[in-house]
Image: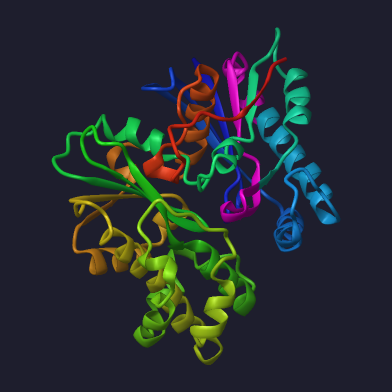
């Protein structure tokens, strides 16, 4: 089945779009993919939505800027699909689209997770672009898991399992996604995957760089490479109950903002030292999580925007003392992996297959999910 996945992650970079052929259990072909960047104005609106969403108590509520953010986000996804179909008209026969939307609030302890994005509106836009009855659209993929008592994240591990099955490796493998938040999937033979968020990844670094320099991120980890890590600050920051909790566990993008303000001492650091310290925090929190797994992995495969950060990869190798490679080095797409995953999850949802497991989100039993909209 030909499927398109659409992902807008916590780094707020843009819309990732990818095509795969899959039955929801194996991937038979990888199609093209693209990233369609948000404008600076888009990012401002989405950042305001993240701030205002902290007061939400109802999943469907869209007060204030959240309504504008949802319209803008849906329009950008429609524009991405229109541009993609113009470039690759042979893929207008897509059978299903997996639409993640944008997470603006994630509070599983309150059984609340909010992903903005108008699925019905996006489907109407797609119907004008493609021939025939058009594809099925699957969205709201986290809600069922959270409602059942799960963390609702990460959802990508079942896709990681499909990918790792194609590798010839002996011993446990960890797939690491470095988005705004870092998360891992631990895979060992036919055991159920174990997964969870490990801590902040790009979000804190991006926020720091924007505040200090106006740049949206630390390109290639250049600022961090020129700085000195404050190991005392790392120790203070790691003194948080989240880092000693075994997976499954999950985070909201903004969970560690106040903690870092209180404990890091960034106001006394240069740009370079602050970037180095926050980058080291990402590596150190991943190392802390690996120590909680059943067996130490022999290989870590890094994906996501943070996999382009050479300084972060170096720090991971130094702190983990295992082989660390990127997804691109094994023939996967590190930048489009999450978009591919939501294409995969959409097909699984259509087939009623589980998207999450007790070992990946803490849900009581394997759970399918997603709202399915048909043309």
At 49% from the left and 58% from the top, the residue drawn is 181
- Image quarter of residue 237: bottom left
Q: Residue furthest top?
A: 132
Q: Residue furthest right?
A: 64
Check the image and report above or below for 369 versus 61. Answer: above
Measured as percent of width and height from the top left, residue 183 is found at 42, 53
Is 30 magenta? The answer is no
At 40% from the left and 34% from the top, the residue drawn is 159
Is 105 magenta? The answer is yes
Measured as percent of width and height from the top left, residue 223 is found at 46, 75
In front: 45, or 58? 58
The image quadrant where one finds the C terminus is: top right
At 59% from the left and 76% from the top, the residue drawn is 258
- Image quarter of residue 317: bottom left
In front: 46, or 151? 151
* Residues shaded magenta: 84-113
- Please tell me how many numbered marks the rendered image carries: 0
Measured as percent of width and height from the top left, residue 57 is found at 74, 54
Q: Is residue 227 visible?
A: no
The colour scheme of the drawn protein is: rainbow
Q: Is residue 346 visible?
A: yes
In front: 38, or 345? 345
In the image, taking residue 48 as reference, residue 226 lies left or right, namely left
Q: Residue furthest left?
A: 170
In front: 204, or 366? 366
In the image, taking residue 262 as reference, residue 241 lies left or right, namely left
At 50% from the left and 84% from the top, the residue drawn is 263
Measured as percent of width and height from the top left, residue 116 is found at 71, 44
């Amino acid at each position: 089945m030909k499927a398109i996945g659409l992902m807008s992650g916590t780094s707020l970079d843009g819309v990732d779009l990818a095509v795969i052929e899959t039955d929801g259990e194996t991937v038979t072909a990888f199609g093209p993919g693209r990233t369609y960047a948000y404008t600076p104005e888009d990012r401002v609106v989405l950042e305001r939505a993240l701030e205002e969403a902290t007061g939400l108590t109802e999943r469907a509520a869209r007060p204030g800027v959240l309504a504008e953010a949802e319209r803008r986000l849906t329009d950008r996804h429609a524009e991405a699909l229109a541009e993609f179909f113009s470039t690759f008209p042979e893929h207008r026969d897509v059978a299903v689209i997996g639409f993640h939307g944008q997470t603006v609030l994630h509070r599983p302890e309150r059984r609340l997770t909010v992903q903005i994005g108008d699925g019905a509106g996006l489907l109407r836009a797609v119907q004008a672009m493609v021939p025939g009855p058009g594809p099925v659209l699957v969205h709201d993929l986290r809600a069922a898991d959270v409602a059942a008592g799960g963390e609702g994240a990460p959802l990508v591990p079942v896709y990681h399992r499909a990918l790792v099955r194609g590798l010839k490796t002996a011993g446990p493998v960890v797939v690491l996604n470095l988005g705004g938040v870092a998360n891992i999937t631990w895979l060992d033979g036919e055991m159920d995957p174990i997964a969870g968020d490990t801590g902040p990844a790009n979000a804190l670094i991006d926020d720091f760089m924007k505040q200090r320099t106006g740049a949206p991120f630390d390109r290639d980890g250049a600022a961090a490479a020129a700085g000195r890590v404050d190991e005392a600050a790392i120790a203070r920051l790691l003194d948080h109950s989240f880092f000693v909790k075994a997976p499954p566990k999950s985070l909201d993008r903004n969970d560690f903002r106040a903690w870092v303000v209180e404990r890091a001492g960034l106001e006394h650091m240069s740009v370079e030292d602050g970037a180095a310290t926050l980058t080291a925090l990402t590596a150190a929190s991943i190392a802390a999580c690996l120590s909680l797994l059943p067996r130490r992995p022999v290989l870590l495969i890094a994906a996501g925007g943070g996999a382009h950060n050479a300084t972060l990869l170096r720090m991971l190798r130094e702190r983990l003392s295992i082989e660390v490679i990127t997804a691109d080095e094994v023939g996967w797409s590190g930048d489009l992996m999450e978009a591919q995953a939501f294409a995969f999850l959409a097909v699984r949802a259509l087939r009623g297959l589980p998207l999450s497991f007790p070992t990946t989100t803490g849900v009581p039993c394997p759970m399918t999910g997603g709202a399915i909209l048909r043309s």
